[in-house]
Image (cartoon, rainbow, N blue to C red):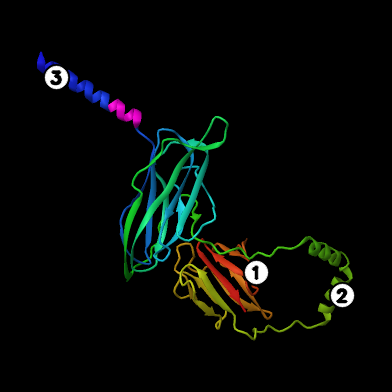
């Protein structure tokens, strides 16, 4: 009888412990890296992971990094319907938030975060803060209570030897990270808009005059600007370098045969080109993702003005000087 009693007590103890663990299992967020040894120029990918018994409708996290050693690139979430919210970024801190219109059950990867190694160093990535979000009874977003942060620090060792950069597949729409250059898009005061309206309203005769003059005036010959313009890379591969536009047209892209080669995963082989037309410089998009002063240039040509800020893909920024 005694062995049976001991066996029964063991079963009761096991079941009690099992239900106790499940009853107290807290939602947890932690940081993971598949490998911790890299070479210069390689991509570091870490994942923010979570388990939650409660369906969530969003999450947020902050990762502290050394800007002298790593450059953040982007973050993506493999969770269906989870969309990134673009936040202002500061050097040394990745700040990311995601939200969904419908509740999502999570058990695994919340987000994939990518960095580029800048040189030989030993550094840490630290999950400084993280939270899961739900919709409360009033219909507003609120942090889920009882969430704990598990493994929050990853030690990385980056060798000075140059590594081979490789394009990694991403899941979902990339959320651009890092400290983006300020927008240089011009703003127009209301008085200037009124003045332009008056000028355009009374400018019909002038337009007719210009049209007639074109009929009797020969077309101007194409000329090359007297000053050599430059492209100054502000962010991305070859940041800090200036490229004088001595040979035109100047093709820009990931292919080494371009006049300006930018080895970035979001830059296409032949992304854009700069050429001269009627004594002016023009930028033509060749099928990549191109923006001038925040305005998209999709397979079209736009004149370049001194001081224009151009973005290629997600990470490359350069200014045009003439």
What kind of secondary structure does the magenta stretch mostly adopt? helix
Give the x, y percent position of residue 3. Answer: 10, 18
| Residue at the limit of the structure toward the top, as seen here | 1
**Residue receiving disc 3:** 6
Of residues 169 and 316, the one nearer the viewer is: 316
- Circle nearer the viewer, 1 or 3: 3
As measured in the structure, the alpha-carbon distance from the residue carrying label 1 to the one carrying label 3 is 84 Å
User: Looking at the image, which residue is at 40% across and 36% down?
Assistant: 52
Instruction: Specify the segment rendered in magenta.
Output: 18-24
Residue 22 lies in the magenta-colored region: yes
SS class of the residue under badge 1?
A: strand
**Residue receiving disc 2:** 209
SS class of the residue under badge 2?
A: helix
- Of mark 1 and mark 3, the one earlier in the sequence is 3
- Of mark 3 and mark 2, the one earlier in the sequence is 3
As measured in the structure, the alpha-carbon distance from the residue carrying label 2 to the one carrying label 1 is 26 Å
Give the x, y percent position of residue 118. Answer: 39, 67
Numbered badge on residue 302:
1
Above or below, 138 relative to 282: above
Residue 58 visible in image: yes
Give the x, y percent position of residue 193. Answer: 79, 62
Above or below, 315 relative to 10: below
- Circle nearer the viewer, 3 or 2: 3
Give the x, y percent position of residue 163. Answer: 34, 68
- Classify 10 Å Cα crowding around label 3: few (below 14), some (14-19), many (20 and above): few
As measured in the structure, the alpha-carbon distance from the residue carrying label 3 to the one carrying label 2 is 108 Å
Of residues 151 and 56, the one nearer the viewer is: 151
């Amino acid at each position: 009888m005694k062995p049976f009693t001991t066996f029964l007590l063991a079963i009761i103890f096991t079941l009690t412990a099992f239900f106790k663990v499940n009853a107290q299992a807290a939602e947890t967020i932690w940081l993971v890296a598949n490998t911790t040894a890299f070479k210069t120029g390689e991509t570091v990918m870490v994942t923010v992971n979570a388990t939650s018994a409660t369906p969530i409708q969003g999450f947020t996290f902050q990762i502290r990094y050394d800007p002298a050693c790593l450059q953040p690139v982007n973050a993506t979430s493999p969770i269906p319907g989870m969309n990134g919210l673009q936040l202002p970024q500061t050097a040394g801190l990745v700040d990311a938030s995601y939200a969904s219109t419908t509740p999502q059950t999570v058990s695994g990867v919340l987000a994939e975060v990518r960095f580029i190694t800048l040189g030989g160093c030993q550094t840490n990535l630290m999950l400084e803060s993280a939270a899961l979000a739900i919709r409360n009874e009033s219909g507003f977003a609120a942090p889920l209570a009882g969430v704990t942060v598990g493994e929050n620090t990853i030690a990385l060792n980056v060798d000075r030897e140059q590594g081979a950069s490789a394009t990694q597949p991403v899941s979902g729409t990339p959320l651009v990270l890092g400290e983006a250059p300020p927008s240089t898009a011009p703003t127009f005061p209301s008085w200037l808009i009124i003045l332009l309206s008056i000028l355009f309203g009374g400018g019909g005769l002038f337009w007719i005059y210009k049209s007639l003059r074109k009929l009797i005036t020969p077309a101007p010959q194409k000329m090359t600007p007297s000053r050599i313009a430059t492209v100054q890379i502000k962010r991305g591969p070859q940041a800090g370098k200036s490229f004088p536009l001595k040979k035109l047209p100047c093709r820009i892209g990931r292919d080494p045969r371009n006049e300006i080669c930018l080895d970035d995963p979001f830059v296409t082989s032949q992304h854009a080109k700069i050429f001269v037309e009627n004594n002016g410089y023009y930028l033509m998009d060749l099928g990549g993702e191109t923006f001038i002063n925040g305005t998209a240039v999709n397979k079209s040509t736009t004149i370049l003005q001194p001081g224009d800020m151009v973005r290629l893909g997600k990470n490359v920024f350069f200014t045009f000087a003439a």
